[in-house]
Amino acid sequence: MALEESHVRRAAHLARLAVSDDQASGFVDDLSRILDMVDQLQSLDTEGVMPLSHPLDATQRLRADEVTESNQRDTFQRCAPAVENGLYLVPRVVE
Amino acid sequence: MQWETVIGLEVHVQLATRSKIFSGASTAFGAEPNTQACAVDLGLPGVLPVLNEQAVAMAVQFGLAVHADIAEVSVFDRKNYFYPDLPKGYQTSQMYHPIVGPGEVEITLEDGSTKRIRIHHAHLEEDAGKSLHEDFHGMTGIDLNRAGTPLLEIVSEPDMRSSKEAAAYLKAIHSIVTYLGISDGNMAEGSMRCDVNVSVRRTSQDPLGTRAEIKNVNSFRFVERAIAFEVERQIELIEDGGSVVQETRLFDPDRDETRSMRTKEEANDYRYFPCPDLLPVVLDQAYLDHLRGQLPELPADKRERFQNELGLSAYDANVISASRDMAEFFEAVHSVCGDAKQSANWVQGELSGALNRENLSIANSPISARQLGELISRVLDDTINGKAAKEVFQALWNGQGESADEVIDAKGLKQVTDTGAIEAMIDQVIADSPAQVAQYRDSEPEKRGKMIGYFVGQVMKASRGTANPQQVNGLLKEKLDALL
């Protein structure tokens, strides 16, 4: 798949990553090579093969429905830039 | 011009677990902000989510209740987007392999007819936090207590054709989840939230029209109103030569309209991928069988049994089976008095009326099912008449007495069925009412039927309401006609 710089910019925007012009053209090359490899993988016949959703050959363990966490708000909020009345403050979000 | 409305619903049900879906933080409602948001919920680095067994069990129970295929293997995916109430930058959800596959729900319409609505699938996911937009020096406040609360998103097929059907479907889902006890179903507190997909087309043969998604419709009534408004808007738009755009709209209950939400500069691209922190969830047959064994009798089965075995009307059976609490109260009343029709009448009439007046739920009824059942028994065995029964009901409601019998004794409400006693009262009334007797005698025979009412009233008054009205009627007629 031929990747263009606009694809890189869009992916960077969705991931909220700042990318300079120099970096962007570098990423076009790097990511294109990765996609070429994916194309190669996709040429394999996978008919009847279950999609692999996790590399470990294991299944999810479940926990009992118990409250095990105590209130540690003060500790957690120590690294927040702004808090008030127990709330985390963020730049205004307009709906 | 005839139009057909096509509706599909996405219902988010908050599961009634004690702890969150991926962490051991409490899900209790109404706590101080951020006191129930732990490191996992906050998305701090290095944390690992562990799935709550109860959330899985509840999702499976729902699936079994709607006759759905339960996935032997289900997988959690990350839905990526940025919003401050989602600190991880993604919502853990199930995009490709949901836990509950296709199923169906039967809805009952107002005329008593039923219709099957197909369920496309239901998946487990986590809720986000809450943004508070009051002014914090130009900033927004974030409370993450709700982040990580387990949700079951139930997605229907576009099988509904009117706002009434959509409301009936939502009620059916509400009834199933509350019967199962997997959610408190409290719409006012957001335990059930609903997104409505609406489109219109000329005929049922046409392909589906472009749909609008109405977000956050949070009551049965709003579902009907939002759809009614949206259908009218779309039809007008098309008839004026325009076309519907696929968009998300918000229902404003105050103005009774839907409004386009600000179009995002970039179309949503959630870049779903399997969550590497969670392994596939594998359920075996023994586990499913175990959960199936724990299912209670569900609303549709109860409705059918009430109708077929207890002889209730379709309407009564539907109203009473809709809520598990009401159904169980009704069954308890019935087991005491043995008369299903009377039990249904009292539960839906006198009791529901009194509960509504005082804004109480049936679970908090001041009158117990045993008390009501005994009261009905006293009407059935002619100990009291209908008028006295209402008085006994009121007394029991007000806590004046432990049982119907106690109130009947204390208030002297026992019905007088002794013919001699009634005759004595009638003779007294006739003796005291010479003018009315003369009038009765002199009037046309066909008018006498009406005039007898006066005498019945007097006798009932003399008996302080305790005489058997049918007996009074019969005996009065005999005695008055003997005077002709």
Image (tube, coloured by chain):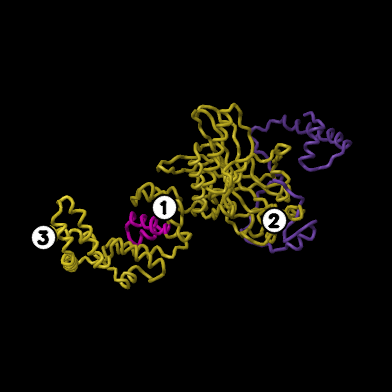
User: What span is in magenta?
Assistant: B328-353
Circle on res. B72: none
Image check: B398 left or right of B273? left
- Where residue B171 appears, as percent x and y from the top left, is 49, 47
The image quarter containing residue B263 is: top right
* Rendered position, B294 above or below B156: below
> Considering only order in the chain, which callout, 3 or 1, is on the residue closer to the N terminus?
1
Is residue B314 located in the magenta-colored stretch of the structure? Answer: no
List the residue tagged with mark 1: B320
In-front residue for pair B181/B111: B111
Q: Could one spot residue B390 in this view of the protein? A: yes
Residue at 63%, 55% in the rendered image? B52
Colour of chain B as rendered: yellow
Q: Which chain is purple?
A: A
Q: Amino acid at mark 2?
A: Asp
Considering the whole magenta stretch, tell me its main secondary structure: helix
List the residue tagged with mark 2: B143
